[in-house]
Amino acid sequence: MQLWLLAPEQVRSLVFIEPILLALLQDAGEAALYSQSLEPAQQFIALAEAGQRDKAWRQFLALRNGPGTWERLSDDARQRFIDQTDQGVGAFKANQNIRVTLADCRRISATTTVICGGETTAPDRRITEIMQRAIPDCAHETIAGAGHMSPLTHADAAAALIAAHLARASR
């Protein structure tokens, strides 16, 4: 369980950048988006477990960052992804078992900012919107032109939003 749920008095502020909290979609009655978010994870797992690691990453990165992402990576970058396939499978399986609810979000008392890429997937965008509405002191920010990997692809914009959050939280 996350520290912000177990010991909220120890957390002064939170920043979430497109958190993978799929259970929130279920809790908010977003069954279609929940299913839409599970499908790519299940495809990745199936391809990886069938030994098709490069195809698993190609499909995942195309979904998250647009078609052709895999092909634009250097050979070294593609190999680093392939080398981390087992961790990716574990993360996908773990993400499917995180059970954060709307009630959990409503109990967050820390100043919070939720960041979303302007070009992200519908399920990821909806999760951030659900969180913003449920968390009492929560700002919602969008990074124009960014997909799910905004801290990597739009690092300066992500850092600026985090700095603004810290300034807001320290007031």
Image (cartoon, helix red, strand yellow):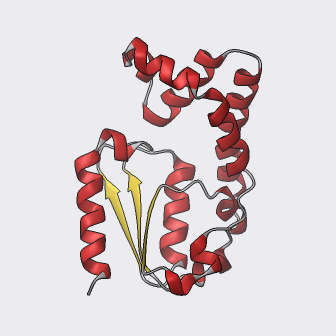
Q: Quadrant of the N terminus?
A: bottom right
Residue 91 drawn at (x, y percent) = 65, 43
The picture places residue 137, in percent across and down from the top left corner, at 43, 83
When asked about the image quadrant of residue 84, the answer is: top right
Which residue is found at the position 48% from the left and 79% from the top? 11
Q: Is residue 109 above or below residue 17?
A: below
Q: Is residue 99 above or below residue 20?
A: below
Query: In terms of depth relative to the viewer, which is nearer, 80 or 34?
Result: 80
Task: Reply above or below: 31 against 99.
Answer: above
Q: Is residue 163 above or below residue 63?
A: below
Residue 167 image position (x, y, % from top left): 24, 76
Specify the farthest residue to the front: 10
The residue at 65%/64% (across/down) is 24
Answer with left or right where residue 112 lies relative to residue 103.
left
Q: Give percent across and percent down for residue 107.
A: 59, 85
Tell me where residue 168 sits by quadrant. Answer: bottom left
Question: Where is the C terminus found, in terms of image quarters?
Answer: bottom left
67 and 2: which is toward the camera = 2
81 left or right of 92 in image: left
Q: How many marks?
A: 0
Q: Which residue is found at the position 41% from the left and 55% from the top?
A: 116
In the image, 153: left or right of 94? left
The residue depicted at 66 percent of the width and 60 percent of the height is 25
